[in-house]
Image: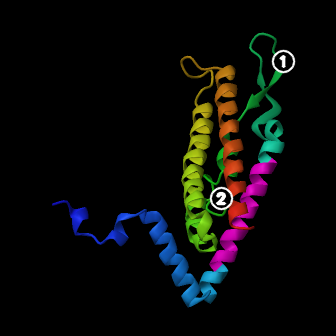
């Protein structure tokens, strides 16, 4: 016999949904504990600030991801050229500083699950998983871009721009996911 045969029917459904319902029931029964209420408000604030920061990054993408300080010269003309820099993406996505609002955002999102209406639990959990994947992909593309320069075989400024553009798509997707998460949380 399978181990599942020994489990009552209650345990055979969607475990995520069941866990979400148990945690929501516990939150209703216990009421907001002062420390948890403070943490929940702080996490909610982080989600709103993170969304605003991603919007700012995307609205000012070129000026934030490009440096034109005259230090890089075109080898053929000797004129100063601008340099694409993907490092700012890591900063805005929460991968660079523990004080960033999106640092380990998925953990804050998990702590905020008690605010999710029961009819939206599955959608919320799917969005949190999508956030993790998309934010890591954005970081990965930005990191790859930082190593795609002319110093490396088959690299060049065009490769930096290509990977940076892929990163921008991921950041755009991440912002959309975060917007939906904030809407479900009614922030």
Question: In the drawing, does residue 32 fall left or right of residue 186?
Answer: left
Measuring from the top left, give residue 59's x and y in whole percent: 83, 43
Q: Nearer the viewer, residue 55 or 73?
A: 55
Q: Secondary structure at mark 1?
A: loop
Q: In the displayed structure, would residue 91 be above or below residue 79?
A: below
Report the magenta residues as a range: 39-56
State whether residue 173 appears in this view. yes
In the image as oriented, which residue stretches furthest toward the top?
Answer: 76
Pinpoint residue 148: horizontal percent, then vertical percent.
60, 26
Q: Residues within 10 Å of mark 1 (few under 14, many from 20)?
A: few
Q: Quadrant of residue 94?
A: bottom right
Numbered tag placed on residue 102 in the rendering: 2
Instruction: Determine which residue is flagged by label 1.
Output: 79
Is residue 101 placed above or below 164 in the rendered structure? below
Q: Tell me which corner region of the image, top left, top right, bottom left or bottom right, holds residue 116.
A: bottom right
- Colouring method of the image: rainbow
Q: Residue at x 65, y 58 (%)?
A: 102
- Quadrant position of the C terminus in the picture: bottom right
Q: Earlier in the sequence, mark 1 or mark 2?
A: 1
In the rendering, at what x and y percent does residue 149 appear?
62, 25
Q: Is residue 41 magenta?
A: yes
Per the model, the C-alpha gap separating discs 1 and 2 is 39 Å
Residue in view at x 72 percent, y 55 percent: 179
């Amino acid at each position: 016999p399978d181990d599942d045969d020994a489990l009552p029917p209650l345990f055979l459904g969607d475990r995520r949904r069941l866990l979400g319902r148990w945690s929501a029931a516990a939150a209703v029964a216990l009421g907001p504990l002062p420390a948890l209420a403070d943490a929940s408000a702080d996490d909610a604030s982080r989600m709103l600030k993170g969304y605003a920061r991603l919007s700012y990054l995307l609205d000012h993408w070129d000026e934030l991801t490009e440096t034109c300080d005259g230090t890089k010269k075109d080898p053929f003309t000797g004129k100063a050229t601008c340099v694409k820099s993907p490092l700012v993406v890591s900063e805005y996505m929460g991968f660079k500083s523990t004080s960033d609002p999106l640092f380990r955002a998925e953990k804050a999102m998990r702590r905020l699950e008690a605010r999710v209406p029961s009819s939206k639990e599955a959608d919320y959990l799917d969005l949190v998983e999508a956030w993790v994947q998309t934010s890591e992909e954005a970081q990965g593309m930005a990191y790859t871009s930082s190593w795609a320069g002319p110093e490396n075989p088959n690299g060049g400024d065009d490769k930096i721009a290509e990977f940076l553009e892929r990163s921008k798509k991921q950041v755009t997707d991440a912002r959309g996911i975060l917007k939906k998460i904030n809407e479900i949380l009614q922030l």
